[in-house]
Image: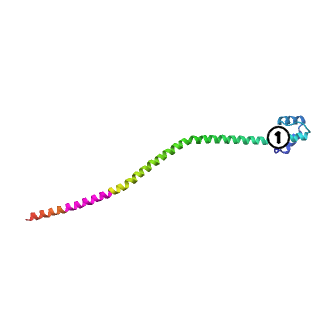
Amino acid sequence: MGQMDSTELREIQDKSMPELWQIANRLGISRKGKKAELIERILEAQGERDIFDRLRLKMQEFEKTREDLKTLIESVSELTPKLDEDKASLESSIREQQEKISKVSDLIPKLEKEKEKLKEDILQLEIEISGFDEQIEQIQRAKVSLSRE
C-alpha cells in the first residue's frame, strides 16, 4: 500500500458510498461490502497502482537507457570500418618502415666493407704520393747537382 498521510485517509473515509463506488469502478475493484472493507480495498488498489506507476516509470527509464545505448552502439559501429581502415594503413606503414630498416641493416655491412676498401685505397695512394715525393726530391737534388757542375 502507498504511503498516505492522515489527511488523505480522512478524506477517503469522509466520502459517501456512491463516491467510494465510483473510485472502486475506476480502480477496477469490487464495490461490494461495508464501507471499511471498500476503503481497505481502495487503499490496497491505490497502493498497487502506485507500485505499478513507479514500475512504469522505471520501465520508461530503462527504455530510454536502452535507446541511448542502441544509438551509442550504432555510432561506434559506424566508426569500426574507419578504425579498421586506419589500422590497415598503419600496419602497411609499419611493414614499409621495417623493410627500410632491413635494407639499411643489409647496407651497413656492405658500406663498412666499402669503407675499409676506401681506407686501403687511400693508404695505397698515400704510399704512391710518398713515392712521388721521393722521386721529386731526387729529381730536385739531381737538378741542383747538375746546375752546380
Q: Which part of the image, by quadrant, shows the N terminus?
A: top right
Q: Which part of the image, by quadrant, shows the C terminus?
A: bottom left
Q: Which residues lie in the magenta part? A: 115-133
**One can see residue 11 in this view:** no
Q: Position of residue 66 (x, y in %)?
A: 67, 41
- Image quadrant of residue 27? top right
Q: Residue at x 51, y 45 (%)?
A: 87
Does 132 lie within the magenta span?
yes
Q: Which residue is mark 1?
A: 46
- Image quadrant of residue 137? bottom left
Q: Tell me: 51 left or right of 129.
A: right
Q: Main secondary structure of the magenta part?
A: helix
Does 41 lie within the magenta span?
no
- Mark 1 residue element: helix
**Residue type indicated by callout 1:** Gln
Q: Tell me: 148 left or right of 91.
A: left
Q: Residue at x 35, y 55 (%)?
A: 111
